[in-house]
Structure formats: C-alpha cells, structure tokens
Image: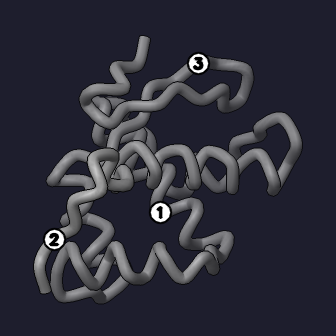
C-alpha cells in the first residue's frame, strides 16, 4: 500500500498493483535521463505540461524503482494500463503531484 505522506502513489500496471515514488535517487536518475542540471530545472520541465511517451516511461520506471521494484524502462514500455496512453499520463501526473506538491499554506519559496 502506498504512503501519500512519503510521496507514494499506487498504480495498476499489467493487472498488478504497484507503489511508485520519486525518491531522491529516482529524481537524480531523471535529471540524468533528461539532461537537467538540478531539481529546479527538472520541476520546470514537468511544469511545461508536455510529456512525451519516452518521458512517461522514464518517470514511471524511476517511480517504480524508487519503491524497490526491479523493473527496467523497457519492461515499463511494454506494460498495459486501463485507458491506454491516457492511463499512463494519469499515473505520471499523480506521481509528479505527489513529488512536487503545491504549497498548501500559501507560502512560496523566495527567488
């Protein structure tokens, strides 16, 4: 079962329930995969709202590995979810929202 307080989500992939979490190691993996210099650049990339199929594979794969699942991106690319491509995007959006939650108290980081 996933723990929302730790940034985890649950997703049904290939008929099996998985927990996903973008841990610091998973985020470092994504920085490398996407060629971003830091977490802010990575977050800005995701805020653009444009996600390619390859992005979705990398994000879901990193999230699965972040929860200890030994699943390669190639395996993720061959998985099935309900609602096809839209289902994968829903997983990505939920995972990113759990990892980068909006400030609930109205406070914003100073620039």
Q: In the image, 1: left or right of 77?
A: left
Rounded to the nearest whole Å, what is the CA distance between mark 1 and mark 2? Answer: 28 Å
Marks 1 and 2 close (CB-CB < 8 Å): no
Mark 3 secondary-structure assignment:
strand
Residue farthest along the front direction in this orientation: 106
> Badge 2 local density, few (<14 within 10 Å), some, or many (20+)?
few
> The N terminus is located in which quarter?
top left
Residue farthest along the top direction in this orientation: 1
Figure colour scheme: one colour
The residue depicted at 30 percent of the width and 88 percent of the height is 35
Q: Is residue 58 above or below residue 80?
A: below
Instruction: Indicate which label's residue lies in the foreground, 3 or 2.
Output: 2
| Residue 109, disc | 2
The residue depicted at 65 percent of the width and 76 percent of the height is 52
Q: Is residue 11 above or below residue 74?
A: above
Report which residue position mark 3 lands on. Answer: 17
Q: In the image, 54: left or right of 39?
A: right
The residue depicted at 54 percent of the width and 82 percent of the height is 48
Report which residue position mark 1 lands on. Answer: 58
> The C terminus is located in which quarter?
bottom left
> Badge 3 local density, few (<14 within 10 Å), some, or many (20+)?
few
| Residue 95 location (% of width, % of height) | 47, 46
Q: Is residue 76 above or below residue 36?
A: above
Rounded to the nearest whole Å, what is the CA distance between mark 1 and mark 3? Answer: 19 Å
Rounded to the nearest whole Å, what is the CA distance between mark 3 and mark 2? Answer: 35 Å
């Amino acid at each position: 079962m996933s723990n929302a307080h730790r940034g985890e989500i649950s997703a049904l992939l290939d008929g099996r329930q998985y927990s996903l979490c973008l841990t610091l190691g998973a985020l470092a993996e994504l920085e490398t995969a996407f060629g971003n210099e830091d977490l802010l650049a990575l977050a800005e990339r995701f805020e653009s709202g444009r996600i390619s199929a390859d992005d979705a594979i990398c994000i879901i794969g990193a999230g699965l590995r972040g929860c200890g699942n030994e699943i390669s991106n190639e395996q993720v690319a061959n998985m099935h979810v309900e609602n096809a491509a839209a289902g994968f995007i829903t997983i990505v959006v939920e995972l990113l929202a759990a990892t980068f939650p909006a400030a609930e108290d109205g406070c914003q980081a100073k620039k």
